[in-house]
Image (cartoon, helix red, strand yellow):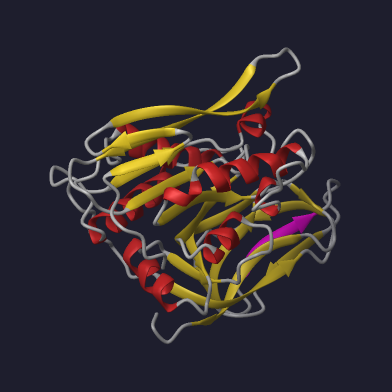
Amino acid sequence: MKNTPEKDVLHILGEDIPLGCSKTINFNVAKLYTSTKVEIPVIIERSKKAGPTVMITAGIHGDEINGVEVVRQIIAKKINKPARGSIICIPVLNVFGFLSMNRFFPDGRDLNRVFPGTKNGSLASRFAYQFVHQILPVADYCLDFHTGGSSRFNAPHIRVDPKNTHLIQLAKVFNAPFTLLSKNLDGSYRATCAKKEITTLLFEGGKSQDSNRDIAREGVQGTMRILHHLEMLSPTLDVPNPMHDTIIVEKSFWIRAKYSGLLHIKIPISKHVAKGEILATITDPYGKMRHEVKSPYQGYIINVNEAPIVYKGDAIFRITTELSNNE
């Protein structure tokens, strides 16, 4: 974890923000073809009492609405007004993708694969570079919210590096239904934070272009538990009591379609299934073929492909195969 002094004055995007100040600064990204500015609101809330700085982000992929909704609720419910320290909220990082309901930047690049960026590279790379140099240095903790790509619905979970025991303990505080132990990917925001020794939790839940109330609730309540752990949650807010302990997943496996056709899901997300249990059926459009998709293992279903049709070889379920002894 980065060991930074508590900041009486927060220097961000060329502005000095003292303790006890609330301010929104527009991060100027680029311009549209029409010369219209594209700006990202950076919403800053500082307590009068010094403490750590927590950055809460979403929308690195513009079509991942669940994460945007989590951060929106954090702001709307005034969870972002800290008892000490500072909370910075950026609900939509990839405004271009958000406007077009697209995962990517206009240059076709995945923003979450170009960090820490370059000063003179593509638009996505330049954005990452500016963000890493002008905003990220003030953060002591980062909470980043994502969803499953395309039609793949993720069970709500936190992803952490399996070698980082501090992050695993913090994931237990967040207490999402699942915690997945997964290595940092090169070029990702999470990997860049790790190299800068900024403590970061990545939340995944739901699917793209979809807003799910249950997923948003998990994200908001987990954030409140983290802020309470850091002694930053306002005393006017109640700490959500978890109904479960997070299940730590060490390994998981994709179950793939053996046939092309119409996909009919038979089980809910997060269900613990037995070996041989029917998970779905695949049929042809003509009523001639019906194939049962059975679980090859017992485990929890942590990802479901909700596409109505699939091709042979498509990933349709992700099932846990190895859980931590600390479950």
Task: Give the left or right position of residue 62, taking residue 215 as reference.
Answer: right
Task: Give the left or right position of residue 127, taking residue 213 as reference.
Answer: right
Task: Give the left or right position of residue 89, taking residue 226 as reference.
Answer: right
Query: 270 above or below 283?
Result: below
Q: Is the magenta stretch mostly helix, strand or loop?
A: strand
Question: 80 or 17, which is in the foreground?
Answer: 17
Task: Kindly identify the residue that appears in the image at 65 percent across and 51 percent down.
Answer: 112
Q: x%, y% of residue 274?
A: 55, 77
Task: Kindly identify the residue that appears in the image at 40 percent across and 67 percent down.
Answer: 171
Q: Give the range drawn in magenta.
A: 278-283
Q: x%, y% of residue 86?
A: 30, 45
Task: Kindly identify the residue that appears in the image at 83 percent across and 46 percent down.
Answer: 285
Q: x%, y% of residue 101?
A: 66, 32
Residue 21 shows in this picture:
yes
Q: x%, y% of residue 253?
A: 66, 74
**Quadrant of residue 292 within the rendered picture:** bottom right
